[in-house]
Amino acid sequence: MPINFILPEFEVERNDYRCIRCRVCERQCANGVHRYDPDGDVMLSDETKCVDCQRCVCLCPTRALKIKKNDAALRTNANWKQNTILEIYKQANTGGVLLSSMGNPEPFPVYWDKILINASQVTNPSIDPLREPMETRVFLGKKPHDIERDANGEINTELPPQIELELPIMFSAMSYGSISYNAHKSLATAAEALGICYNTGEGGLHEDFYQYGKNTIVQVASGRFGVYKDYLEAGAAIEIKMGQGAKPGIGGHLPGTKVGADVSKTRMIPEGSDAISPAPHHDIYSIEDLRQLVFSLKEATEYQKPVIVKVAAVHNIAAIASGIARSGADIIAIDGFRGGTGAAPTRIRDNVGIPIELALAAVDKRLRDEGIRQNVSLVVGGSVRSASDVVKAIALGADACYIATSALLALGCHLCRTCQSGKCNWGIATQDPELVKRLNPETGKERLVNLLTAWKHEIKEMMGLMGINSIEALRGNRLMLRGVGLNEKELEILGISHAGE
Amino acid sequence: MKYVIIGNGPAAVSCIDGIRSVDPDGSITVISKEDHPAYFRPLISYYLEGKSKAENIYCRRADFYESSNCGVIHSEAVAIDTDNRSVMLKNGESIPYDRLCICTGSSPFVPPMKGLETVENKYTFLTVDDSFAIEKAITKDSRVLIIGAGLIGLKCAEGLRDRVQSVTVCDLAPRVLSSILDDECAAIVQKHLENCGIGFSLGNTADRFDGNTAMMKDGSEIGFDVLVLALGVRPNIGFFKEAGGACGRAIIVDNEMKTSVDGIFAAGDCVEQYDISFGDKRIMALLPNANLGGYTAGVNMAGGSAEFDNAVPMNSIGFWGLHMMTAGTYANDENAQMIEEKGEKSIKRFFIKNNRLVGFIIIGDVKSAGIYTNLIRTQADISAYDPDALTKNATLLPFGENYRRKTLGGVV
Amino acid sequence: MKRVTVHEEWCLGCHLCEYNCAFANSGLADMVKALKNQKITPRIHVEEDGRIHYAVSCRHCEDPICIKGCISGALQKGADGVVTIDHDKCVGCLSCMLLCPYGCITTDENETVLKCELCVKNGDIPACVQGCPNRAIVFEEVQT
């Protein structure tokens, strides 16, 4: 084999005094990094295979292991960075498109971190959420323009269909195929326990999970995998996936090796066949076409289910959202460029799309300006990392947030960003039964419930300190936000003042 | 209800437990020939070896008889009057019973041997008193000759090795443990024992004695200071036989441990009962069977209902690091198929008949052998199991996930 | 009573239970000190074949046959239902190993019997359960 030029990215540091040769690291590494040599009674490591998933570190009972960044370095070059050079080597080795997973890791600005939240002092009292009621429940869907009354003057309470959420957070789309059965089960059961929704992604709905239907959003994507009448009727809402923040403008590709019997049945495609989602929906070339699909789905489900249209945050997002709001959709979901993926071409993930914070502010303003904001609810995702990100998103105009990376982290993901290999040591992004079983869905559910219970407490605390006692009152309340270190243009788009103003 | 138990070993105390599990009030009388509370007979060699302390050999806590509300008479039963339901004692007393359990065990068998009366230091090895007596007789310089290379003889040899100058074991049979091992397995054990310092003279035995010298059959002479006679045991069933009870080589009992005589039960080393691995009745003088049989007898005596219907012979013995286990039936059966697994330091032989494991011999790698014993005891059909997975290592792998879910995930 | 139950579908075959058991019963405060360069003799063991793994430890049977076969009275079932071994009494005859239908009895380097005692001397929750990374070994009340 010719030299491949690739430097190992990580280094395994083993404290030999602490190592008791229990070989847990060896048994737990699906990448085959660790190996016991009985002749020398030593543990050996092949760091070229290490992806820094930290599984061995977490399971080592004597904490003898450390995975470090390999300091073996090419000569420093501010233009030709080491990673840039290694990517060239990789492509020269294989002739292939570079693949990556999870969200864009490049150092683009994170606007959440440049926005600060207001608090009540003296003239406007804050609210103690431990003493006063605090409403985190939200309803997603089209709201009426005006209050209508019948002949007797009674308020007409008939609303278009809504999704009811106990807190303004949902688990965003991750398909069965890209993540494991146990990961899906964890999400489904946690959503049920939390009174929120999870999202099937484009992989169909496993028959075992129809029971969680009222907490499920079923997705219809360009590949139409697993879509049929029962599927559409199973969920609380239907989501048309037009785009994904990590890879706007392209489709998905689940390799045939991951399409085992169960995935094949759920996706309704032959076992072992590649599941390729086309880049566009081949029946949608205009807002009018989108409207046809929206109403086809509504017709199929007797107008009982809200329809979500999910798009990636791209340059003209405000205009696009305006179109969608007129297509009959009940909810618009916008996915920012830092959103995750199970596999995307590296160049696309790292260079296409725009930050969700700017997209959200622009869309909310545009829909308000056009007087159609109540036509739709806005759900935003693409790296919502904490309760404060949620609060800021709602103050910028969102009705709810989608989280996925945060949820996977709660399930044990260590963001090694090698989902595309299918050898997830944490049992999340894999279909290998031996790895899938590493995620016990009982534990998974508990951890997800814990995470969002904690966030709910934090959201209430933050609303309370602003003197606000419901999500409704926080939504679009941009006076509660100030920017730091942002230029005039950024502040203008975000629709917020600078700190100190 | 008056319960009488003749004998005071493990079967007897298990019988008391069995009675008390049903009837907390009836009077129980134990007739004990030995002057000790019930003790674990196999421990007498470990006592000599120093592994068991004298105070630790008892089957139950000191207050057992009292807390079980149970009287103990130190005497020996000599006859049973089945018509009047009473037991005659050596001291002339007569003890009436409603239910009787015979747990008399067995006694050493010593055939007539020329010149034996000239040997001063000669002992049998079955009771703790034998053990105490041998302990008194030996010194660091003693040469011990043990007649009999069966379980008792070899365990005695193990117990004595480090306390005397030499131990020699002789037996008329050409191999050690002839009742439980075949030639090849016996050779492994003998070799190991020789390496551990035990001398053997097999296929040979003492023809006659003259003081401290044994004149052997092959003409050689073996000098000794202490002689241990371990030629075997005979069940103590004389008085039962005389009372008209049905006996083979021992008292015949059914699965409820009932004898042929109404109101009389029996358990322990003095009974023969149905061996499911063998398909006929035989003596299985082993501690687990004594416990299980005694308890069953007790329950049934008190009007409860219990069966001991899966008795099989079994042995677990070890000598200085070499363990061997046997169970079931494995000798001289042409209809049984043998599967052998040989390792570097171990040998396993499985005997299979009609798709059922009926016996095994394992020397060396005895880990988890109870899995095999269980297959014999439950007469499981093993045709569905992968023979390799079954015999290579003793694990629960061959039995499937459902079996494991039940046993490892539930209460058994 | 609470028992250790094993849930094979979640067992990863990592063998951590064996090491946690050996450590908990070592009497030492540091795992490295306790287990470094030692051949461990845990009271729980993992059996495996390819993709099948599961841990086996004493079932604390309702009617433990090991006790019936114990020739020294070393094995006892307490009022709490826990089957324990008295090392002062055990002579290492391994009759219990010959009888245990599940292969739960093991020995230490001195050839006396070791078996799971539910960590009654080590704390509230057995070490194998506490250290199991995937809840494959659980300490729970089980209905008979």
Image (cartoon, rainbow, N blue to C red):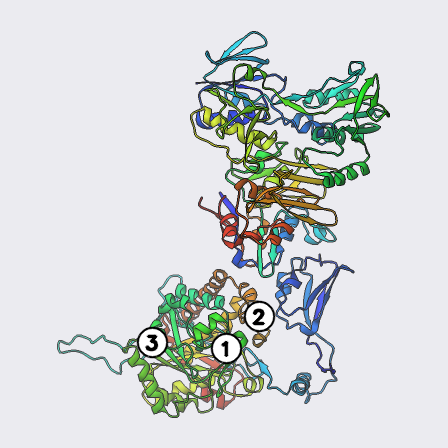
Asked whether the residues under marks 2 and 3 belong to the same chain, the reply is yes
- Tell me which amino acid carries mark 3: Lys
Q: Nearer the viewer, residue C133 or A317?
A: C133
Q: Residue at x 54, y 11 (%)?
A: B88
What secondary structure is found at the residue carrying circle 1? Answer: loop
In the rendered image, the vertical position of residue C98 relative to residue B8, given as above or below? below
Q: Residues within 10 Å of mark 1 (few under 14, many from 20)?
A: many
Q: Which residue is mark 2?
A: A424
Q: Which of the 4 quarters of the picture holds residue A243?
A: bottom left
Q: Nearest to the eye among marks 2 and 3: give it.
A: 3
Instruction: Work out whether disc 3 and disc 1 sit on a shared chain.
Output: yes
Count neighbours of disc 3 (C-alpha within 10 A) and say few if under 14, some if 14 to 19, many if 20 or more: few
Look at mark 1 in the image and give the residue it sits on: A383
Q: Is residue A81 left or right of residue B222?
A: left
**Alpha carbon separation for disc pair 3 and 1:** 32 Å
The vertical placement of A48 against B19, above or below, is below
Q: Nearer the viewer, residue C122 or A342?
A: A342
> How busy is the neighbourhood of tag 2: few (under 14 within 10 Å), some, or many (20 plus)?
many
Badge 2 or badge 3: first in the primary sequence: 3
Tell me the number on the disc at residue C80.
none
Residue A50 percent across, percent down from the top left: 66, 72
Q: Which residue is mark 3?
A: A229
Residue A352 as seen in the image, left or right of residue A306: right
The amino acid pointed to by label 1 is: Ser
| Chain for disc number 3 | A
Q: Are marks 3 and 1 in contact (CB under 8 Å)?
A: no
- Rounded to the nearest angstrom, the CA distance separating label 1 from label 2 is 21 Å
